[in-house]
Amino acid sequence: SILRYFNDSFESILDSNSKIYSINSSNNKIKLKSASQNIIDDAFLETLKNKDIPTGDMNFSDKESCGPILNTVTKYFRTSVLSLVNKKLFKVLVGEKVEKILFNKNGRAIGVETNSSSFDADYIILAGGVIGTNKILLEIKQNYDGNQSPLSNINIGHGVKDHTNLRVNVITNKNIGSLNEISNSFFKKLFLIFKYLIGKPSLMTGTGATSAAHLDLNNDGKIDTRIQIVQFTETGRHGSDGNFFSNRPGFSISITPINPKSNGEITLSGGLQTVNPKYLSSKDDMELLKLALQYCLKLLSSKPISNHILEIMDKDIMENNPEEYIINNIFSGHHLIGGAFDAIDSNFKLHNIEGFYVCDASIFEKYAASNIHSSVVLIADIFSKKFINNNSDS
C-alpha cells in the first residue's frame, strides 16, 4: 500500500533488496549477518516453536515467525548506506546548517543558505530526517519571501508517528554472557573484544538484540507486534540516558507495536520546534501493548525458557495493573516517520515547487516494519530511479 502511491510494486522492491543487501561479503552492498545466539536465544525460539510459531526470516514481517536477528555489519563495524558507495562522486560538508531554501522569482528552488555560506543548486533533495525535514518545510510554509507560500494549503507536520518500545526485564538464574555481566567485568570486556577481533560472533556486531518474533496478537490476520530478546536489563532507561545495566545477569523482551494508530505532530512557533508523537493517544495501541505483556508473561512461564529465569521484574504490576506499567515504562523507539507525506507527488517532488524533492522517513504515512532502516534505504532506491529517469535530459 505504501508503494502504490509511487507506482511501484513489491516485486520491484524485492529485486532492489537483493541488489542492495547481501548475506555474503560483496562490494557496494550492505552486508547482513545473523546476531550471535546464546542459551536464552535457543530457549526463546524453542518456546515459540512449541507455541506453533515457525522459524523464518526476520527481515520480513508478513507472517508469524521467529528467528535470529540480521544486523548490518562489516568485518569490524556496523554499517550504513555508505557501504553502497565504492567511489564517492559527491562532496560532504561537515558543520553546515541549512537555514534557508533559496528561490528564484518564478518560485523554483535554486539553492540553500547555511550558517556560513550559500550554495547554488540545479536540484535540491531534502533528506533531513523527520525532525529536520518538517522544520525546513514548516519554515517555507510560514516564512516564504513571496506573497503566498506554495505550501500554504498543504499539511506539514501532521500524522507524525513513532514506535513505542516496552521492556519486560528478566533476571536469570545463571550467567548467560549478557551485557550486564560484561559491563561489570574488565576481563569479560577484554575477552569480548578478543572474540570480536578474531571474527567470532559477539554482541559487538549488533545492538544487543539477538532474536525476534513477529506476532498477530489480536488475531485479525495481520502481523501487529514484534518481540525480541535483548541481552541486557537496564536500570537507567527511564528518566536517564539508558546506559546503566543491572548488576545481575539478565535479559529483556523488547515489545514494539509495528503500526501504531497514535498520531502526533511537529509544530514550529517563533522559530522553536516542538515534536510530539502523542504516544498512546489511540486506545488501540494501549490494548495491543496489554496483549503483548500478557503474551510475554505466558511465554516466560513456559519451558524451556522458564528453566533459566530467577525473577521477572515488576511482574505483579504487569499482571494486576498493566496500564500503569505501560504508561510508566514506554519510551521512544527513535523510529519517527511522517509529517511530509501530503507534501510530495508520486515522483517525490514537492507540490508547487520546481527543483525540490523530499526523500526520507517523513514521507511515510505508515510503517512497513518494526524498524525503518531498510524502509528508508529502499524508498531512496525508488526515488533515485525516478529522479534519474525524469531528469536525464536536464
Image (cartoon, helix red, strand yellow):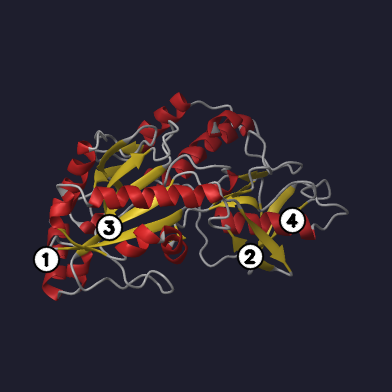
Distance in Å between CA atoms under marks 4 and 1: 53 Å
Q: Secondary structure at mark 4?
A: helix
Q: Could you give the CA–CA distance between mark 1 and mark 2, rounded to whole angstroms?
A: 44 Å
Please name the residue that numbered disc 1 is placed on. 191
What is the three-letter code of the residue carrying label 3?
Gly
> Which residue is identified by label 4?
140
What's the CA distance linking mark 4 and mark 2?
Answer: 17 Å
Q: Does 12 sit above or below residue 301?
A: above
Q: Amino acid at mark 4?
A: Ile
Residue ID at (45%, 66%): 328
Q: Secondary structure at mark 2?
A: strand
Circle nearer the viewer, 4 or 2: 2
Residue 215 image offset from top left, x and y in percent: 36, 39
Which one is earlier in the sequence, the residue at label 1 or at label 2?
1
Residue furthest out toward the front = 320
* Front residue of 60 and 20: 60
Residue contact at pointers 4 and 2, CB within 8 angstroms: no
Q: What secondary structure is found at the residue carrying circle 1? A: helix
Could you tell which of marks 4 and 1 lies nearer the N-terminus? 4
